[in-house]
Image (cartoon, rainbow, N blue to C red):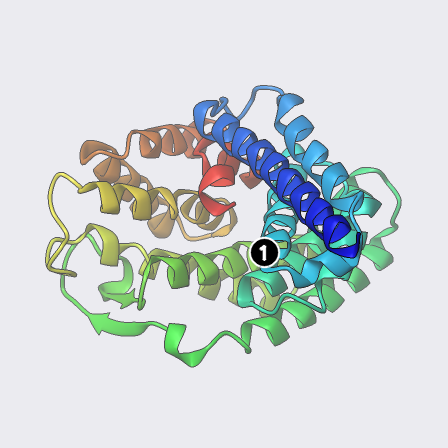
Amino acid sequence: MRSSLQANNAANQSLTDETLQSVLLLDLYEKMAYQPHPESEFPGSWLSHVQGALSIVRSRPTAGFSNPTTQQLATRTVIALTLSCGAAGIPIPEALIGLYNDLDSYVRSTKWTFIGLLISLINLRADMNNGKLDSSDIVQRARDFYEELSHAEGKIPRSWWPQRRDTSEGVVFGRYYDVYPGHYATQVFNAYRIMRLDVCSIIQKFDPSSEVAETITEVAQAICAAVPQFILPRARSQNTLPFSPLQILECSGVLTPLYAASQNTQDPVMRAWILRTLVYMADNGIKLAQSVAQVIMFLPDMDYWAVFRMVGNCAITA
C-alpha cells in the first residue's frame, strides 16, 4: 500500500512538473514572439501564463523544493514573474515574495541574490508611483537599497571580473574597453549597473549631490566599456562583420544597458558615442539597435523597462 501511494505521489509530481514546464515555455514563447513598441500598452497576457505558474508552485508543499527539478522550475517562475512585473510597472505580488523567501534557503547563486534586490527595487518604484512615500522615505529606502546593492556586488566572484584593454580604436569610448570571461558575466554586471543607475537617479531627484553624479558617470562608463568586446573584430578571434549569431545574442543583451547609460549620463560625447554604436550594430545585424537609437533621439524619457521588453530582454534574461 505504502509503495503504491509513493508511486502515485511521484506520478502526480511528475505530471505537475510537466504542466509547470509547459506554462513557463508558453510564457517564454510569448515574450520572444511579441516585442511591442515601447509606447504600446503592456499586454495583459504577458502576466497570465507566469501568474498561472505561480499558482501551480504555491499549491504544492514547500518540502518539494528539495527536489532539484521542482526547485529549478519554482526558481524560473520567480525570475520570470519578477521580470514581468518590472516590465509592467506593477508591484511584486505577496505570493511571489513568499515563494522567494521559501526558496531562499535552497537556492544560492549570484542571479538569485540579484532577483531579491530587483524585487525590492520594483516595489520601491511602485510605491513611489502610487504616492505611498514622502520624499524623505524615498531617499531613505533608496540609500538603504544602494548599500544592499554594493554589498551584493562585492560578492560577485573575482573570476567574473573583467580585464581592461587599452586601445586607440576610434570606435571605443574613452580609449579602453573591458573583456569579461563570458557573456553571462557581462550580463550580471550590467544588470547590477542598471539597478545602480536607477537608484542613483531616484536619490539625485530628491537629494542631489556630487557623489551620486560621479557614481552615475562611473557606471555609465563601465557599461560603454563592456560593449567593444562583442563588436570589435580584433577584440576576439570569433568576432566577425557582419555579426555572427552569437554576437547578435551578446549585443542584444547590451541594448538596455546602453539605453540606461544614455538616459542617465550628462555627457553629450558619451550619448553621441552610444548612438553611433547602436547604428553600427544595426548595420551589422542587430536591427533592434536602430529602434533603441530612435527611442534615445525621440523619446529620451522612456522608462528603461519599456526598452527592456521592446528588445526581448524579458525572454533572454529569464
**Callout 1 amino acid:** Met
Which corner quadrant of the image does residue 229 belong to?
bottom left
Question: Which is more toward the observer, 313 or 133?
Answer: 313
Which corner quadrant of the image does residue 49 belong to?
top right
Percent coordinates x, y for residue 141 in the rendering: 79, 61
Give the residue number, with chain letter if any, for mark 1: 195
Local SS, label 1: helix
Q: Residue furthest front?
A: 1
Q: Residue at x 27, y 35 (%)?
A: 286
Q: Is residue 46 left or right of residue 55?
A: left
Q: Is residue 98 left or right of residue 69?
A: right
Percent coordinates x, y for residue 149 in the rendering: 63, 68
Q: Is residue 91 visible?
A: yes
Question: Which is more toward the observer, 238 or 174?
Answer: 238
Q: How many marks?
A: 1
Q: Residue at x 83, y 46 (%)?
A: 94
Percent coordinates x, y for residue 75 in the rendering: 62, 53
Q: Is residue 218 left or right of residue 151?
A: left
Q: Is residue 208 visible?
A: no
Q: Residue at x 68, y 63 (%)?
A: 66
Is residue 169 shown above or below 284? Answer: below
Q: Is residue 32 left or right of residue 97?
A: left
Is residue 103 shown above or below 26? Answer: below
Question: Which is more toward the observer, 37 or 104?
Answer: 104
Q: Residue at x 68, y 72 (%)?
A: 147
Is residue 148 shown above or below 293? Answer: below
Percent coordinates x, y for residue 292 in the rendering: 40, 33
Instruction: Estimate how packed mark 1 is, as few (under 14), some (14 to 19) or many (20 or more) residues with alpha carbons within 10 Å.
Output: many
